Amino acid sequence: MSAEIIPFKRPEPPAEDDVPHLEGAFFCMACDHEWQGVAPHQPGPLQFGSPNNPVQCPSCKAHRGYIKFDFMPAEDELVWSCDCKNQLFVLTTTHIHCPCCGLKQVFPDFSK
């Protein structure tokens, strides 16, 4: 009695050009340039264009390019903005830090 042998192979890693990519609007915190871009999809905190892994701006060449956010507050909701017009902040236990200009702002009292 003979049986067909089915070989089990380890899947080949995807080709470099077959890796999922993100596509969308990017902006530069250094020069305010905006552009359409593509970056390899890398889930987690080191996603290209995330706050932990900025990309190079095609205009000023600074590595301060970020992908625009998919989820924004409602248009009628108040949004905290820095004097430099930045709306992306690092929150600490004592202040709001603007990574664009370095300004440290104290938390306002929103209860009033």
Image (cartoon, rainbow, N blue to C red):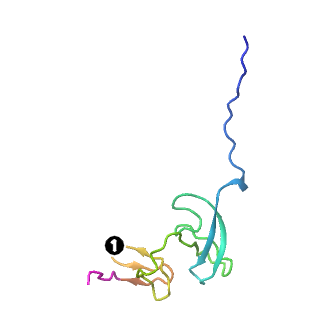
For the point 59% across and 58% down, the residue is: 42
Quadrant in which residue 66 is drawn: bottom right
Instruction: Point out the residue furthest to the top here.
Output: 1
Task: Indicate whether 45 appears above or below 104.
Answer: above
The question of residue 29 being in magenta is answered with no
For the point 29% across and 82% down, the residue is: 109
- Residue 96 % position (x, y): 39, 78
Q: Quadrant of the N terminus?
A: top right
- Residue 82 % position (x, y): 45, 85
For the point 73% across and 21% down, the residue is: 4
In-front residue for pair 1/103: 1
Task: Indicate whether 14 appears above or below 45.
Answer: above
In what element is the residue under mark 1?
Answer: loop
Is 111 left or right of 14, judged from the image as shown?
left
- Residue 55 % position (x, y): 62, 71
What is the magenta segment's predominant secondary structure?
loop
Q: Quadrant of the C terminus?
A: bottom left
In-front residue for pair 43/54: 43
What number of labels is visible? 1
- Residue 77 % position (x, y): 41, 80
Is 16 left or right of 79, judged from the image as shown?
right
Mark 1 highlights which residue?
93
Is 57 left or right of 46, judged from the image as shown?
right
Quadrant in which residue 28 is drawn: bottom right
The question of residue 107 being in magenta is answered with yes
Residue type indicated by callout 1 = Thr
For the point 47% across and 82% down, the residue is: 102
Q: Which residues are magenta?
A: 106-112
